[in-house]
Amino acid sequence: MAIMITDECINCGACEPECPNTAIYEGGVEWTWGGGTSLKEVTLEDGTVVDANEAQEPVSDEFYYIVTAKCTECNGFHEEPQCAAVCPVDCCVDDPDHVETEEELLAKKALMHGE
């Protein structure tokens, strides 16, 4: 299961530097597939190939957000999601809309980091 940031977020930014996949961004900031990964290009579900350094639309304009497709819940890096561990208001929580097994999360990590 990926992690999401709820609208209780106080925009403190404590979570962003803790993410080993660079999946967390400030509200309104564009993100890239390549940021924090070794990806050069990404094939989307519809078959479209995207340059990993191409800017993507922000997921939220108001609060810090997590790019679900880059979140591995810190599997392969840490024992627990680091964003949740450092969040002072406990707004980094499991995303029930994006349930993934540990094996899927580790495969995502391996893909993003060229392992």
Image: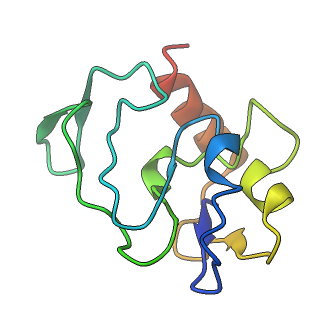
| Above or below 115: residue 70 | below
x, y percent for residue 103: 66, 39
Quadrant location of residue 51?
top left
* Quarter of the image that includes the C terminus: top right
The residue positioned 52% from the left and 66% from the top of the image is 64
| Above or below 72: residue 5 | below
* Quarter of the image that includes the N terminus: bottom right
Quadrant location of residue 76?
top right
Quadrant location of residue 12?
bottom right
| Above or below 11: residue 50 | above
Looking at the image, the residue that sits furthest to the front is 12
Looking at the image, the residue that sits furthest to the bottom is 8
Q: In the figure, is residue 41 to the left or right of 102?
A: left
Q: In the figure, is residue 42 to the left or right of 18?
A: left
Looking at the image, the residue that sits furthest to the top is 115
Q: In the figure, is residue 85 to the left or right of 81?
A: right
Work out whether residue 63 or residue 112 is closer to the camera in this orientation and state it. 63
Work out whether residue 77 or residue 1 is closer to the camera in this orientation and state it. 77
x, y percent for residue 11: 60, 71
x, y percent for residue 85: 85, 57
The residue positioned 34% from the left and 48% from the top of the image is 31
The residue positioned 36% from the left and 23% from the top of the image is 39
x, y percent for residue 79: 88, 41
**Badge count:** 0
User: How is the structure coloured here?
Assistant: rainbow
The residue positioned 62% from the left and 42% from the top of the image is 105
Q: In the figure, is residue 113 to the left or right of 38?
A: right
| Above or below 86: residue 75 | above
